[in-house]
Image: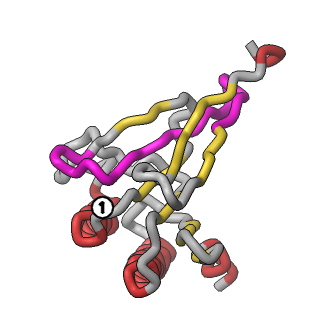
Amino acid sequence: MGWLTFRKFFCNSYLYFLFLYILCEQRTGEFVNRLAAAVNWLEATFDAAEKADSPGIFIMIHANPRFDLAQDDPERAGFNRFLKLLEEKIQVFGRPVILAHGDFHFYLLDRPLPGVSNFTRVQTFGADEVNWIRVTVDPKSAEVFKIEPVVVEENL
């Protein structure tokens, strides 16, 4: 069960950080186990952050959870339970939450949940665009997280 080590959260005295590895493929036993663990860690992270009155939460996952697709689309189906819980927790939490992920290999910063202003998604660079993002954390600011793309000129 080494995959459980991918699900961790930690607190740096101000903010909670959660790292998850979620499979979108629903037809494997591993998917069921990973999703259950991811949901448990997501709940535990929000509960701990709420109890500590944390100003924000930063979540990292590997795959693009496909906010752009309908819930009944097969490419999104494996993420639906996680996304439903995430949206519920974000709305109750009421403070900034960032979801960072890779997978599609181009930079994207948006607010993919209509009407949920405290949630931001950032998709990182990858493969064909080897650059990086800088995340600055200021627990005393209203936004808490400042995200900036950093382009490495040598990689253009």
- Count of all numbered marks drawn on residues in the image: 1
* Few, some or many residues within 10 Å of mark 1 (<14, 14–19, 20+): some
Q: Quadrant of the C terminus?
A: top right
Question: Does the magenta-highlighted stretch encompass residue 114?
Answer: yes
Q: Is residue 24 left or right of residue 16?
A: left
**Boundaries of the magenta span:** 113-133
Residue 77 or 118: which is nearer the viewer? 118
Which quadrant of the figure contains the N terminus?
bottom right
Could you say which is closer to the camera, residue 99 or residue 61?
99
Q: Is residue 49 left or right of residue 154?
A: left
Query: Who's the residue at 25% across and 41% down the image?
Result: 69
Q: Secondary structure at mark 1?
A: helix
Nearest the viewer among 146 and 35 is 146
Q: Residue at x 39, y 57 (%)?
A: 96
Instruction: From the viewer's perspective, tell me whether residue 109 is left or right of residue 75.
Output: right
> Which quadrant holds residue 42?
bottom left
Q: Main secondary structure of the magenta part?
A: loop
Residue highlighted by disc 1: 83
Let me know if residue 29 appears in the view.
no
Residue 71 pos. (x, y %): 19, 52
Q: Residue at x 49, y 75 (%)?
A: 34
- In the picture shown, does residue 86 fall above or below 154? below
Displayed quadrant of residue 87: bottom left
Q: Amino acid at mark 1?
A: Leu
| Residue 104 rendering spot, x and y as whole percentages | 51, 35
Q: Residue furthest right?
A: 154
Q: Position of residue 9 (x, y in %)?
A: 58, 76
